Image: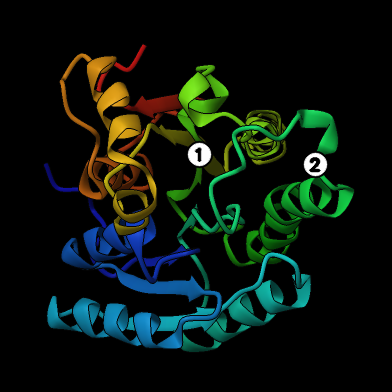
Amino acid sequence: MDLQLLGRTVFVTGGSRGIGRAIALGYAGEGARVAFSYHSHRELADQTAAAIRDLGAEALPVRVDLDEPSSGAAAVTAIGRRWGGVDVFVANAVRWPDELPDQSRRFEHVPDTEWQGMLRANVEGLIALLQAVLPAMRGRADARIVLISSDLVRHRDPALHGLGFYSAAKAALVGLANGLISDLAGEVLVNIVSPGLTTTERNLTEMPQPVRDQQIARTATRRLSTPDDIARAVLFLGSPANGNITGELVTVAGGFN
């Protein structure tokens, strides 16, 4: 299937590694020009940019911090100067806990600074990014937005205790998408992709093997999703080949239950 992405401008946040990198490379492989954000690891961003260029596509790494709304506006300005606007916006960047939560810590003992910071970055930070990027998308034919949520919104998993605040932030994307769809009716298609536990380098390093085994045992395909699995869903929804799908939440979790 021709996704009709040749020459289109894509902006992927959190694109220097993991799922975001797979998405960025996927769009590059389809001939799109790819801007992607990184937070602090410029060396990883440079490696991703080189990989995009190896595919024959143009690349533009930009720094975005979800805690600094001005950084998102600056990134969109840089993209506009280079390519004139944005056709596809993929919101993948996320504030994730620095380490897996203490399994013995009670919900009410989580410091305010910890849970408020996660909600503000993942919800308010995304809203600020959308407000910055939408003017660069309006009026462009076949514009698409894909928000990356999490299957933690749909499933309560005792093996991943302590991630309630992260789940709350990701659940907020559903309401946000509904509002966007109403505001952008006839202009931009908006969808959500919800990954299950995915074999990113970080998850393979930090997620204990027994936790991964429990997840696999509850998955119909008997394997965890790869970053490329997620990217393929995002590429279709965020392309002109998706002609009339909007307001949908697509779960890529191998039939996890």
Classify 10 Å Cα crowding around label 1: few (below 14), some (14-19), many (20 and above).
Answer: many
Tag 1–tag 2 contact (CB < 8 Å): no
Q: Amino acid at mark 1?
A: Leu
98 or 250, nearer to the observer? 98
SS under mark 2: loop
Measure how far apart labels 1 and 2 are at the Cα level: 37 Å
Q: Which residue, given by chain and number where applicable, does mark 1 sit on?
A: 189
The residue depicted at 85 percent of the width and 54 percent of the height is 113
Q: Quadrant of residue 214?
A: top left
* Residue 71 point in image, percent of width and height: 69, 78
Q: Amino acid at mark 2?
A: Val
138 or 38, nearer to the observer? 38
Classify 239 as above or below 10. Answer: above
Label 1 vs 2, first from the N-terminus:
2
Q: Which residue, given by chain and number where applicable, does mark 2 sit on?
A: 110
Name the image quarter holding the C terminus. top left
Image side of residue 160 versus residue 29, left or right:
right
* Residue 19 point in image, percent of width and height: 35, 54
Whether residue 251 is visible, yes or no, is yes
